[in-house]
Image (cartoon, helix red, strand yellow):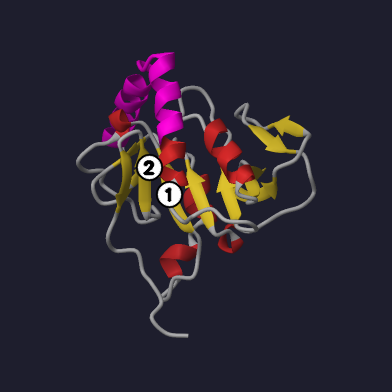
């Protein structure tokens, strides 16, 4: 656990050292790479975070999703104590949660299992799709169903990051939910091992 804390601190420092032009260029390139896929289409339910601090800016991707007619959902913390999170439709009115992150101020909710794609924030990622988050475990709890399923029909899990957030190996914990892909300024990286359905 101490190693994860040290790694998280080092990666956050490296991310914070990027200049504003570097961050803007990376955000635009990430959106451009996603635009070249078939991930976005009218009616698709897309989970997308509101970037905080030095996280990769999602504004260009949000505009891209809206141009493609996607339905956007943002994370909402239902219980900090229980580390419970759901997704809510993008709305005009927002509130700030305990961590200062804007959340749509609406009563509507969507379980993560019913989204088509979730674009996820991260502190670090490795060559195997392991994700290092902020340490609270909200995403891992919301996506725990992915570990229990023998046949995957859940959302595509895509991390968004700067290239400096890549490391060779992150030792996973039993509750970690791995990514299917990561998009950085350098392009898209796919990871093997995501379960898929072959019947019905």
Badge 1 marks a residue whose secondary structure is strand
Residue at x 31% of width, y 21% of height: 14
Residue 121 left/right relative to 65: left
Q: Relative to residue 199, is residue 51 depicted above or below?
A: above
Give the quadrant of the N terminus: top left
Residue at x 58% of width, y 45% of height: 65
Residue at x 44% of width, y 15% of height: 20
Q: Is residue 144 magenta?
A: no
Q: Is residue 135 visible?
A: no
Q: Relative to residue 98, is residue 173 depicted above or below?
A: below
Residue 93 in the image: x percent, y percent? 78, 34
Residue at x 25% of width, y 51% of height: 128
Provide the residue designation for mark 2: 183
Q: Relative to residue 198, is residue 116 depicted above or below?
A: above
Within 10 angstroms of label 1, few (less than 14), some, or many (20 or more) residues? many
Q: Between marks 2 and 1, how big is the CA–CA gap?
A: 7 Å
Within 10 angstroms of label 2, few (less than 14), some, or many (20 or more) residues? many
Which residue is the extreme one toward the left? 168
Residue 189 in the image: x percent, y percent? 30, 48
Badge 2 marks a residue whose secondary structure is strand
Provide the residue designation for mark 1: 158
Q: Is residue 51 visible?
A: yes
Chain-order first, disc 2 or disc 1: 1
Question: Looking at the rendering, which quadrant does residue 132 occupy?
Answer: top left
Residue 15 left/right relative to 87: left
Q: Is residue 24 magenta?
A: yes
Q: Are marks 2 and 1 in contact (CB under 8 Å)?
A: yes
Q: How many numbered circles does the render carry?
A: 2
Dominant SS of magenta comes to helix
Provide the residue span drawn in magenta. Answer: 2-29
Residue 176 in the image: x percent, y percent? 38, 52
């Amino acid at each position: 656990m101490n190693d994860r804390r040290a790694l998280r601190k080092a990666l956050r420092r490296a991310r914070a050292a990027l200049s504003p032009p570097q961050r803007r260029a990376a955000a635009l390139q990430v959106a451009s790479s996603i635009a070249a896929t078939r991930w976005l289409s009218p009616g698709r339910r897309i989970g997308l975070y509101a970037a905080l601090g030095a996280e990769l800016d999602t504004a260009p991707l949000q505009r891209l999703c809206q141009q493609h007619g996607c339905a956007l959902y943002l994370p909402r913390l239902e219980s900090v104590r229980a580390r419970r999170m759901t997704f809510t439709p993008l709305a005009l009115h927002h509130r700030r949660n305990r961590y200062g992150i804007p959340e749509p101020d609406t009563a509507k909710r969507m379980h993560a299992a019913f989204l088509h794609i979730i674009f996820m924030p991260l502190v670090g990622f490795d060559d195997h799709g392991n994700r290092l988050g902020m340490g609270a475990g909200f995403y891992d709890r919301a996506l725990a169903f992915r570990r229990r399923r023998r046949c995957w029909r859940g959302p595509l899990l895509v991390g968004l990051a700067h290239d400096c957030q890549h490391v060779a190996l992150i030792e996973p914990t039993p509750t970690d939910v791995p990514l299917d892909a990561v998009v950085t300024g350098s392009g898209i990286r796919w990871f093997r091992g995501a379960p898929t359905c072959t019947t019905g």
